Image: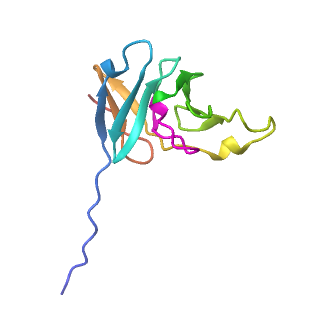
Amino acid sequence: MSQATQPETVPSTWVKIASTDALAGPRPVAPVTAFGQKLVLFRDEEGELGLIGRYCPHRGADLCFGRHENNGIRCPFHGWHFDRSGQCTEQPAEPVDSTMYKAIKLPSFTVVERNGEIFAWSGEGTPPVLDA
């Protein structure tokens, strides 16, 4: 009698992605590669961390070179603005009454800072408490 095997899954876990030193200085923005993706890590004006997709979905500009402002990153090419959840919050070239920006969102990950290190959650749902 043969046994059906379950596909092996990768467990969800916290992953160290950077040290807090990576965000030291006047412009707290750093490129990160994690979970098979190129991402941008930043600390906003409120001191909160964001980890979002690195490339603007409009023309593929590298957001690591974007303007760090308004609690997010503004694309250096056409000025689209993304908050720490990856949500596009502004498209300057669109008409004033346009709501297209609401449908645009980059991948984002939950991040926490512990003992001088920054960790990101690779799973779905609410992550467990990090005991680092």
Q: Relative to 93, say whether 57 is above or below.
A: below
Q: Residue at x 55, y 45 (%)?
A: 57
The answer to whether residue 118 shows anywhere in this view is yes
Q: Where does the magenta region start and end?
A: 51-64
- Magenta stretch contains residue 58: yes
Q: Residue furthest right?
A: 97
Can you give x and y, in whole percent of width and height, for residue 121 in the image?
A: 37, 40
Q: Residue at x 60, y 22 (%)?
A: 70
Q: Relative to 63, say whether 20 is above or below.
A: above
Q: Residue at x 53, y 38 (%)?
A: 86
Pick the quarter of the image with the C terminus: top left
Magenta segment, principal secondary structure?
loop
Query: Which quarter of the figure has residue 80?
Result: top right
The answer to whether residue 129 shows anywhere in this view is no
Q: Residue furthest top?
A: 26
Query: Which quarter of the figure has residue 29?
Result: top left
Viewer-nearest residue: 100 or 2: 100
Q: Relative to 106, say whether 7 is above or below.
A: below
Q: Residue at x 26, y 63 (%)?
A: 8
Can you give x and y, in whole percent of width and height, for residue 67 in the image?
A: 54, 24
Viewer-nearest residue: 29 or 120: 29
Viewer-nearest residue: 36 or 7: 36
- Magenta stretch contains residue 46: no
In the displayed structure image, the side of residue 109 where residue 56 appears, left or right: right
In the displayed structure image, the side of residue 63 where residue 20 appears, left or right: left
Viewer-nearest residue: 43 or 116: 43
